[in-house]
Amino acid sequence: MAAGDLGPADGPALRVIGRARTRWGPDDCPKNIGRARERGAPATLEIDPAFAPALRGLSVGQPVIVLYWMDRARRDLLVQAPRHVDGPRGSFALRSPNRPNTISQSTVRITALDTDTGRVEVDALDCYDGTPLIDIKPWLPSIDLPPGETG
């Protein structure tokens, strides 16, 4: 497996494009992006210089979907019983980072952008400092809103 890849050598691999820089650690990380915003903690996406050209076309104020690998989450929980719901639910019915593939996502807004250095500041992020980033995608209401909803 190449450096920066996540996954087994004989199966799908994800390339780490950078790291999230947040103020969160295991003892104080918010449970979701809404709580991260409430706590007023912007975050920085440090993109590896090799991938900085991929930031071209993004702009300050734009909403983006950030995908990240919750590298410290459990991968063996298929059914969970979180406190905020009544009864156990399957991992696919929850936003928990504990899942077969620990991919998480948040829709955030770009607050500052430096495409030369690969630094993208966003309004918030709900992951530990140093969490591997695996993708950034533009959020587009024409694509990302469910059918029949208006934005």
Image (tube, rainbow, N blue to C red):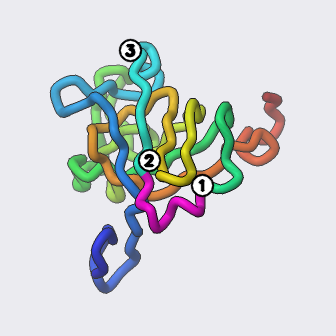
Q: Percent x, y for residue 6?
A: 32, 68
| Residues rendered magenta in the picture | 47-55
Position of 43 compared to 82: left or right? Answer: right
Q: Which is closer to the viewer, label 1 or label 2?
A: 1
Q: Residue at x 77, y 39 (%)?
A: 141
What is the distance, in whole Å, between disc 3 and disc 2 at their CAs?
A: 27 Å
**Residue on which disc 2 sits:** 92
The verdict on residue 84 being magenta is no
Q: Which is closer to the viewer, label 3 or label 1?
A: 1
Callout 2, which amino acid?
A: Phe
* Residue 103 visible in the snapshot: no
What is the distance, in whole Å, between disc 1 and disc 2 at their CAs?
A: 30 Å
Up/down of 32 relative to 68, above or below: above
Name the disc covering residue 39, or none. Answer: 3
Up/down of 17 relative to 7, above or below: above
Image quarter of residue 59 = top right
Q: Residue at x 42, y 16 (%)?
A: 40
Q: Quadrant of the N terminus?
A: bottom left
**Residue on which disc 1 sits:** 55
Q: Which is closer to the viewer, label 3 or label 2?
A: 3
Q: Tell me the element at label 2.
A: helix
Q: Residue at x 40, y 68 (%)?
A: 15
* Residue density around tag 3, few if under 14, some if 14–19, many if 20 or more, within 10 Å: few
Up/down of 144 relative to 71, above or below: above
Position of 46 compared to 53: left or right? Answer: left
Q: Quadrant of the C terminus?
A: top right
